[in-house]
Image (cartoon, grey):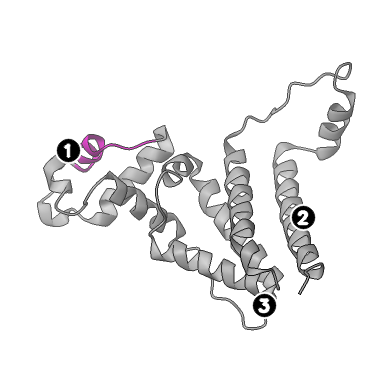
């Protein structure tokens, strides 16, 4: 493959190459990016500051098309539900990226704005200020964990009727893997929202 002129190399091409590598292997490297783009490794540093810079650009990349403006009539529950779904969908498409993104501070403006929208919605719910970050962290755990479910095998539990009768019945009732995963996600979001609503109702002023 002939090397493209330096002017053809862009940050977008570098990020797309890195994302494709992460999707395939779980990681990326400057030498592999350079080889795939047909450029010298040193030319990458004319546009990218560091490995950490690429990771943050990857974070911005997967969230770029996901932000939806809030409707003025949207309730806090609707906003939180929408944001959790959007957050989950971003990572479900690129589950291998999760460990890399969790390893460093969030700086991508699109992602910070999503968290701002989430914090504002939770504040509107009446949740005490001291509980806002706990709620955001809980939503993080849920959205990331549910996104990683896409990497799980179809048969998650090797159960027998003899030794695990209750779990066996539950699995049979849950239906095919895809249905089970979707139902579990909706169940989890409902449980999160109900828990937050319950805390606001029992708030002591």
Horizontal side of residue 132 vs 45, given as left or right? right
Closer to the chain start, of discs 3 and 2, is: 3
The reply to whether discs 3 and 2 touch (Cβ–Cβ < 8 Å) is no
How far separated are the C-alphas under marks 1 and 2?
Answer: 53 Å
Nearer the observer, 156 or 111: 111
Q: Which residue is drawn at 64% across and 58% down?
A: 135
**Res 75 → quadrant:** bottom right
Q: Residue furthest bottom?
A: 72
Query: Where residue 35 sits: x, y (%)?
Result: 20, 36
Q: Visible in this render: residue 2?
A: no
**Res 39 → quadrant:** top left
Closer to the chain start, of discs 3 and 1, is: 1
Q: Residue at x 21, y 51 (%)?
A: 49
How far separated are the C-alphas under marks 3 and 1?
Answer: 52 Å
Query: Where residue 7 sits: x, y (%)?
Result: 12, 57
Asked if the stretch drawn in magenta spans residue 80, the answer is no
Q: Quickly name the residue at label 1.
A: 1
Query: Where residue 76 sits: x, y (%)?
Result: 68, 72
Horizontal side of residue 162 vs 182, given as left or right? right
Q: Residue furthest front?
A: 205
Mark whose residue sits in front, 1 or 2 = 2
* SS assignment at label 1: loop
The reply to whether discs 1 and 2 touch (Cβ–Cβ < 8 Å) is no
Q: Main secondary structure of the magenta part?
A: helix
Q: Quickly name the residue at label 3.
A: 74
Horizontal side of residue 135 vs 174, given as left or right? left
**Res 25 → quadrant:** top left
Q: Which residue lies furthest to the top in this view?
A: 162
Q: Quickly name the residue at label 2.
A: 191
Mark whose residue sits in front, 3 or 2 = 2
Numbered range of the magenta stretch = 27-37
């Amino acid at each position: 493959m002939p090397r493209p002129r330096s002017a053809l190399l862009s940050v977008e091409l570098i990020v797309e190459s890195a994302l494709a590598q992460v999707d395939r292997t779980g990681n990326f490297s400057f030498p592999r990016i350079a080889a795939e783009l047909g450029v010298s490794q040193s030319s990458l540093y004319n546009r990218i500051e560091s490995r950490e810079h690429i990771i943050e650009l990857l974070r911005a990349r997967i969230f770029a098309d996901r932000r939806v403006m809030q409707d003025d009539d949207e309730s806090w529950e609707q906003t939180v539900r929408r944001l959790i779904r959007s957050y989950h969908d971003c990572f479900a498409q690129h589950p291998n990226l999760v460990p890399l993104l969790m390893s460093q501070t969030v700086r991508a403006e699109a992602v910070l704005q999503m968290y701002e929208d989430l914090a504002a919605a939770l504040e509107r719910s009446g949740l005490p200020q001291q509980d806002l970050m706990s709620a955001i962290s809980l939503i993080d755990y849920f959205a990331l964990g549910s996104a990683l479910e896409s990497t799980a095998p179809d048969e998650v539990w090797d159960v027998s009727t003899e030794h695990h009768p209750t779990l066996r019945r539950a699995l049979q009732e849950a239906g095919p893997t895809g249905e089970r995963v979707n139902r579990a996600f909706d169940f989890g979001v409902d449980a999160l929202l109900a828990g937050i609503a319950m805390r606001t109702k029992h708030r002591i002023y």
